[in-house]
Image: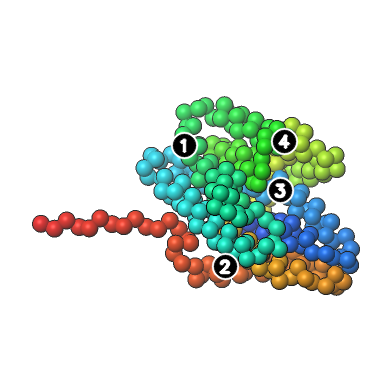
Amino acid sequence: METRQRAIWADAAKGVCILLVVVWHTVNKSYLRIDWTSAGPFPALWGVVGDALMTLRMPLFFTISGMFALSAYRRPWGLVVRSRVAKFLYLYLAWMVVHTAVFWFTPAFDTLSARSPGQFAEQLLLTPPNLWYLYALALYFAAAKLLHRIPVPVLLGAAALLAVVTAAGVLDTPGNRGSLLQNFVFFLLGLHLRPWAERVATTTTWRRTAIVGLVYGTALAAMLLLSAQRIPAVWTLVSLLATVFGLSAAPLLGRLRLIGDGLAWLGRRTLPIYVIHMPLLAVVHTTTSGLPADAPLAVAALYPAAVTAALVAACLLIDRVLPAWLRDLPARRREPALTA
């Protein structure tokens, strides 16, 4: 049981994170933009839940990404630059082209999208749109490698300060630039404190997880009720609590064979879900934004969950027929063999 738990807990955590990402996009970019008149409290509840879990999904996602990057981080540049930097920058560019094209034809879908070559260049380099996670993976790994001579405590302290300053609104952070700056510290935590993160995960108990969850939930509720997100260090500390909670809870989910295996299976397929779900959501929203204002209460209550499930299933089906150039960096051409 222990070996199985260690094998799947990180993938199970990634599975939870990608579901939370799709739910949040569904809620904020579609559900809350429909003119419901008989939805009761559900739009407000879904909105609060989606915003609250921002402290969990990406910090935990990047912590695990940092853990998985450790072996590559220890290798020479020449062995990893293609797989850890060029690959993600290439996928970021390729899928930005796809997203931009789809969003051009779905203007009712309100999301950051380029409408001119200048805007495309700005978003590609400075203000990453919805695909910012790919951009971040490439930049974070490159930055970590370039800064490898800096003592880890100093590096983590500087990254934490950057996160605190960004969350406090000191810096100009249009689009997803704020998320890009805030989450670097969590990638570094996973990269440089991997033994600690693994120890938290592999020694977890239901009792400890409940205590950590209670502390996290209390801090999160206080932050939201007091609108304290911009108070320096509050957002970063609550996100750190969320990450510890996620590291503690994921192995427990992994022990639940059906749920754990299902989440881990999703966690090993996060990339296609991440890159495909937004264009699909744009099409869904364009189709469903005309739902009758007096749609049944059950529709309003279940819309985010139902659409999320449909999007994930559709992404996995589409992934089976994607062309190779949308899956990975094209392979290098081999040099022709020399003949005598």
Seen from the viewer's position, the closer of residues 260 and 21 is 21
Residue type at mark 1 is Lys
| Res 25 → quadrant | bottom right
Residue type at the position of mark 4: Gly
Image point (46%, 67%), residue name: 323
- One can see residue 139 in this view: yes
Q: Nearer the viewer, residue 218 or 305?
A: 305
Q: Nearer the viewer, mark 2 or mark 4?
A: 4
Secondary structure category for the residue under label 2: helix
Q: Give the crowd class for mark 2: few <14, some 14-19, many >=20 residues within 10 Å.
A: some
Q: Are marks 3 and 1 in contact (CB under 8 Å)?
A: no
Q: Which residue is mark 1?
A: 145
Q: Percent x, y for residue 122?
A: 57, 46
Q: Would you identify the image quadrant in which residue 8 lies?
A: bottom right
For marks 3 and 1 on the same chain, the one whose residue lies earlier in the sequence: 3
Q: Mark 2 — residue?
A: 316
Could you tell me residue 309's position as x and y percent?
Answer: 68, 67
What kind of residue is marked 3? Met
Residue at 60% in and 29% down: 158
Closer to the N terminus: mark 1 or mark 2? Answer: 1
Instruction: Give the Cα distance between marks 4 and 3.
Output: 16 Å
Callouts 3 and 2 close, C-beta under 8 Å: no
Residue 265, position in %: x, y?
57, 62
Instruction: Answer with mark 1 or mark 4, whichever residue precedes in sequence.
Output: 1
Distance from Cα at disc 3 to Cα at disc 2: 24 Å
* 82 vs 131, nearest the viewer: 131
- Number of marks drawn: 4
Instruction: List the residue tagged with mark 4.
Output: 169
Question: Foreground residue, 305 or 172?
Answer: 172
Q: Mark 1 or mark 4, which is nearer to you?
A: 4
Q: Secondary structure at mark 3?
A: helix
